[in-house]
Image (cartoon, rainbow, N blue to C red):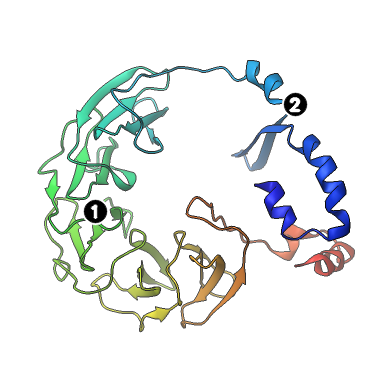
Amino acid sequence: GFSELINTVILERYAEDFGVGLSELSQLRPLHFQFDRYRGKFLTSGFLHYGTAEQAAPAAGNLWTLALDTVLAREPFLVSNHDSEEMEVLVQDAANQLYLVAKDGQLLWKVQLDGPIVGDVHQIDYYKNRKLQYLFSTTNSIHLVDRKGRPVADYPIQFSAGASAGVACIDYDGKRDYRIFLGAENGNLYGYYKTGKPLPGWSPLRSNGVLTHPVEHFAYAGKDYLALATQDGKLQLLNRRGEPRREAINLGSPLLTPIRFSESDGLVMEACDTLGRLLRIKLDGTYNSLQLPRISDRSLLATAQLSDKSLARSEEHTSELQSRQY
């Protein structure tokens, strides 16, 4: 992938030298970075392995191995154990069985679901007692299960309209009074209290369009916004009641990645679309774009807010950085 990226921008007179050096570059194997904060300090550590695949193989040992009943259906979900505060693994197989696996590889339980999980798994504190449950959707149901794999309260909630994107779970005021939203294949949007009771005005909210990603929430200038990206290339911003904050923003193509939010020069929404563009969208509906190479649905979009102070310690460094911007 790195060589393909370089070949799109490299000058022809350097192509031969790059080809010679590619065999050396290919020996760069695992690369890991860790970032942490401790007592007011920002800590980083990293690991880089250099060598052939044969040299790297002996160092790659398994911590544990778990045999599933059939093949893995999708990537695992990392979840938190509210008792030990250790990380555990939720994984689903092709037979729609959900497994919870402890940190040491021990299988804690296995339950049968009615279909593959759509979107992500959220952990919520349903009973407000600091014990966490797992909230997720399949195509036809919204599930909430506890740490022992048991359904919580009146879950699962049947969803006959067919889910187009994963479930969204929003805690507006930080009081664990969650609101749950799910987009349907017919273009309607459904909203629920955490108990599963429909929200007024959201049962359903009709004809918003089929979602490409779960509903996303952000708060800015004392107002809540619900962002809906649809398959027809539009971005809609709603309030808590499902009323439009403004007319839909026509982006020209569907979004490929979820929206990320930053508050530089006011609030900006950032995402990549199916044309390979990085879009920066303002609340007034205007946006600019930057064409990126080889964007796919497996690409990771991350954003960071950098100030002049964080980029440079002096006027000389600042002018040097400005001359290197691209």
Q: Position of residue 106 (x, y in %)?
A: 35, 17
Q: Residue at x 61, y 58 (%)?
A: 304
Q: Residue at x 20, y 66 (%)?
A: 186
Q: Position of residue 215 (x, y in %)?
A: 33, 62
Give the quarter of the image for residue 234. Answer: bottom left
Q: Of marks 1 and 2, which one's residue comes earlier in the chain?
A: 2
Query: What residue is shown with label 2?
Result: 51
Q: Is residue 320 left or right of residue 247?
A: right
Residues 88 and 81: in front is: 88
257 is higher (above) or lower (below) than 122: below
Residues 268 and 295: in front is: 295
Whole-angstrom CA distance, mark 1 to mark 2, is 52 Å
Secondary element at image label 1 = loop
Q: Say what amino acid the circle numbered 2 marks.
A: Gly
Query: What residue is shown with label 1?
Result: 177
Residues 322 and 289: in front is: 289
Q: Position of residue 218 (x, y in %)?
A: 40, 64
- Could you classify mark 2 by the number of other residues whose Cα lies within 10 Å: few (under 14), some (14-19), or many (20 or more)? some
Q: Which mark is residue 119?
A: none
